[in-house]
Image: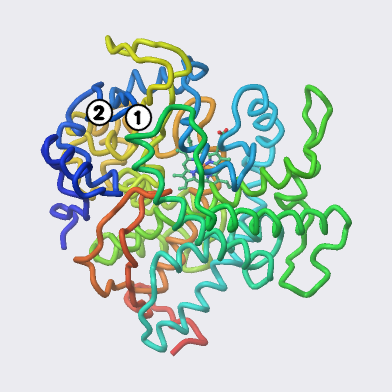
Amino acid sequence: MDSDLYRPPAPKPLSPTLSLLRTLMRGERDLLGLLPEEAYRIRVAPMGVSRRKILLVNEPSVVRRLLTEAAGDYPKNDLMIGALRPLVGEGMFISQGETWKRQRRMLEPAFTHMRINRAFAAMEAAVADYETHLDGVAARGEVFSLEAGMSHVTADIIGRTIFSRTLESEDARGIFDDFARYQNAVANVELRRLLWGKPFADIPQPAEVTEACGRIRDHIGRLIDARIAGQADRDGSGSSGQDGDLAAEVIAAVDPETGTKFDREELVDQIGTFFLAGHETTASVLTWCFFILSNQPEAVRRMRREIEAVTGGGPVRFEHTKRLAFTRNVFRETLRLYPPLTFIPRVAIREVEIEGHRLPRGAMVMISPWIIHRHMDFWRDPDRFDPDRFDPDRFEAGEGEPGAYLPFGLGPRVCIGAAFATLESALILARLIRRFDFAMAEPDKVRPVARLTTRPASEVLATVSLAGPVRQEAGQAAPVGVV
Ligand code: HEM
């Protein structure tokens, strides 16, 4: 289908009454499906009826203020913190105040351009292994879960980046499997609590969640202990050299202001945070990328032409990834349509007033990349897939409202891994699109829901086959070792 016409799946917005009725009568669990049409039109307005006051804020200038200069009055939402704490303790994603400031200044150096450049080798190795796996899937004509595949490759990347371990190693595998259990169980509590929960109340988690988190933390603790004792990676479990990996950086990090290092508990918190924040987010947007591209042959042809032109037909190198302008626009546009963090919720710690709305302490301030990215006033034909809207010429000419694009958040709590995620995604997209044609088994069944990330409601079943056209156009042989 031509991209001019393509609007990938999104829930049909409801009238406010129907939205409320569904919440009350059907115990609906997916917040995306409950958003009324008005949500995509209004600038700042209270949301529906709930025990807790919720203010939806779409206006970009107000969003910017709340997330930057006024950030101190609007810390991260207590419900989100309650769901994540069993896993990441006081890790940087949810910590507040001085604790967070210290963590951020200690961890920021690990995410500089130079360090990310070093992580590229781990990314390349993980993608190469995944390509080999997909070669087999293609040869056997297997149907596979696209989301599980993307989770696998991004978890493999983060495991290699943190601990220089592949997903084949026992602890890395254990973390991956328990994380999947955690994610499925924790999502269920959120919507009910969001609408009817008491502010700042303790949130009990199901045993499944706390047990999975306990096991993940045990795995991470063991890997850290082994590393500190200098024994890691001597067991033939797929080590690729641990000098300068993320675990080494976090263990060695010193706070420039106090001269202190992280203690063991803090190390488990931070490494758990990187695992949590660093793989499912990227996996979710890549799932949507490949889903959309399976429906967009012209976009795929353009990507392949670009990849061949930039790489000269050779491997995709670090320096190439920045020059893949169209491929990066496909990634940006997919992040717009399916931002992995559907909501960036905040809570008022005192009585406040926002654009004339008085809010009591404990009120929720709902900032939603999903809604802002599809807002009728901020984007032309917002539901349409149109990667070229991010061309600098079009974008600067007013294609998108300034400040209306925030997949990585804004202000002091902006995503620390944005450059990492962009790099790995460009590499994965370029390598897999160059080599494979993706087809979806049941495209009409795919619909997004808001869980821990914006993900498909059920498994997206896909097949792959080896792509021929670009290599033939470029007059090169098909890759060896495949059917
Ligand atoms: C496409 C992929 C990703 C997306 C869309 C994304 C999105 C976000 C967003 C929206 C926030 C801000 C949340 C808030 O303000 O409440 C955030 C924070 C964070 N992200 Fe990411 N993220 C991605 C990948 C990564 C990766 C790869 C890592 C690490 C390797 C990472 C680590 C973090 C951390 C540690 C924070 C907390 C920062 C702080 O509070 O100081 N993220 N991310």
Q: Amino acid at mark 2?
A: Met
Please indicate whether residue 182 sits to the left or right of residue 378 in the image.
right
Nearest to the observer: residue 29 or residue 441 = 29
Q: Which mark is residue 321?
A: none
Q: Answer yes or no: disc 1 within 8 Å of ligand 1.
A: no
Residue 222 visible? The answer is yes
- Which element is circle 1 on? strand
Label located before the other in sequence (1 or 2): 2
Marks 2 and 1: in contact by CB < 8 Å? yes
* Quadrant of image for the C terminus: bottom left
- Which element is circle 2 on? loop
Q: Which mark is residue 366?
A: 1
Nearest to the observer: residue 206 or residue 170 = 206
Residue found at x 70% / y 49%: 246
Q: Position of residue 56 (x, y in %)?
A: 29, 27
Name above or below for residue 331 compared with residue 57.
Answer: below
Q: Position of residue 210 (x, y in %)?
A: 58, 52
Figure quadrant of residue 224: bottom right
Residue found at x 59% / y 46%: 86
- The residue at which mark 2 appears reads as 47
Please indicate whether residue 470 sits to the left or right of residue 410 in the image.
left
Q: Count residues near mark 1 (Cα–Cα under 10 Å), then give few for <14, some for 14-19, many for 20+.
A: many
Residue 472 visible? The answer is no
Name above or below for residue 332 compared with residue 200.
Answer: below
